[in-house]
Image: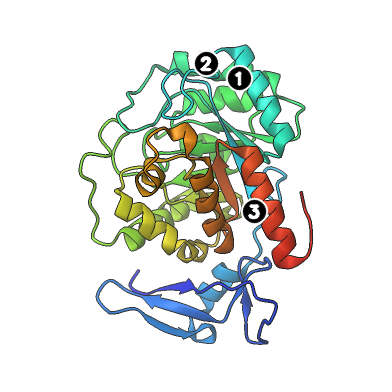
Amino acid sequence: MSTYFRPLINSSASRPDSALSVAGGQLWFDYVEKLSRDQTSEIIPAHMIPEIWKERLCAPRPPIAGVAMTVPSIMGILNVTPDSFSDGGQYQSTDAAIAQGSAIAQMGADFIDVGGESTRPGALEIPVEEEIYRIEPVIKALQGIASAISIDTRKAAVAEVALSAGAKLVNDVSGFQFDAKLLPLCAEKSIPVCVMHSQGLPETMQNNPSYDNIVLDVYDFLHLQIERLVNAGVRRSQIIADPGIGFGKTMRHNLALLQKISLFHGLGVAVLLGMSRKGFIGKITGEEDARNRVIGSVAAAMVGASQGVQIFRVHDVKETRQAFDVWQTAQFGDFYG
């Protein structure tokens, strides 16, 4: 791809007649930033962009696993691991994980993302059997709660067990590059998927990551992977794209992605951001303890919400839900919580 168009998103009530809606929602744009790898960016009217870009930027995003994509939704993190970067060990036991899953559902999580293998920087792969042992009883026990269950895994064998136990979405941090059997499984089961960008494996991904153009490189990867998913039989309407904040990226890379996140609406799918408590927030705030990065995490989520991001993967469900409820009510005069 040689030319890209990033919508300059607005939420003002004084919307001009020429404005276009972002993904069928309440936010809009009438100008875009035209980007390329070999020319200086320029601002142009939205009516000048190609029709395919208009279609993908503006088309409403259908519900995913029963969750509407018209307002910001929350994916609560449930790590059933001893070594995740922020909450490792807190919910390692099945009983603790079930209690936490029920609690974050009551706090307003639209999804609960259950993971049995840490993918923090430096984490090593664990056996499939161990990952299944951790997640299967938790997913089974959480059936019947209001939140849709997502399985956070790179492995087809784990995903198959999780789907049989009641999971409704597969979230693969490798972007369907780790296990060749996972994509055919998801296509066969006709379930929603989240495809994420990462550079390298967790154990090495933070060893001097580099890009020609971080934003466009990540966009191109996701574009190609989405086409691969669609060609394999996954419906575009059931795909979520995640630029992978913190996965093989420096602080400068993370900030560039956040600042230009609206570009990713051009993929024509729902967009997910996972920034909760991550290292770049600690560097900005000076807070070394990840558990104390709640305010910074919510602030980052609000930046994404103002740019039309549909899904936010967070540790702090209650605090994020409060922020979204207040923003939605104050900005648009309606309440959806």
Mark 2 touching mark 1, by CB under 8 A? yes
Residue 246 percent coordinates (x, y): 37, 44
Name the amino acid type tagged 3: Pro
Q: Is residue 70 visible?
A: no
Q: Which residue is drawn at 49% across and 47% down?
A: 296
Residue 337 seen in this snapshot? yes
Circles 3 and 1: CB distance less than 8 Å?
Answer: no
Label whose residue precedes the other's in the sequence (3 or 2) = 3
How many residues crowd around disc 2 within 10 Å: few (fewer than 14), some, or many (20 or more)? some
Q: Residue type at mark 1?
A: Ala
Quarter occupied by residue 34: bottom left
Residue placed most toward the observer, 306 or 190: 306
Q: Could you say where residue 104 lies in the image, as x and y percent from the top left?
A: 67, 32
Which comes sooner in the sequence, label 3 or label 1?
3
Residue under the point 40% across and 56% down: 224
Q: Toward the viewer: 154 or 336?
A: 336
Q: Which amino acid does label 2 sit on?
A: Gln
- Alpha carbon separation for disc pair 3 and 1: 25 Å
- Residue closer to the observer: 38 or 99: 99
Q: Name the residue under label 3.
A: 72
**Position of residue 264 in the picture relative to residue 138 (left or right):** left
> What residue sits 64% from the left and 59% below the top?
61
Q: What element carries label 2?
A: loop
Disc 3 from disc 2: Cα separation: 29 Å
Measured in 3D between alpha carbons, the distance from the residue under mark 2 to the one under mark 1, in whole angstroms, is 7 Å
Q: Tell me the crowding category of disc 3: few under 14, some 14 to 19, or many 20 or more residues within 10 angstroms, Cα based.
A: many
Q: Name the residue under label 2.
A: 92
For residue 163, the mark is: none
Element assignment for label 1? helix
Query: What label sits on residue 97 in the rendered view?
Result: 1
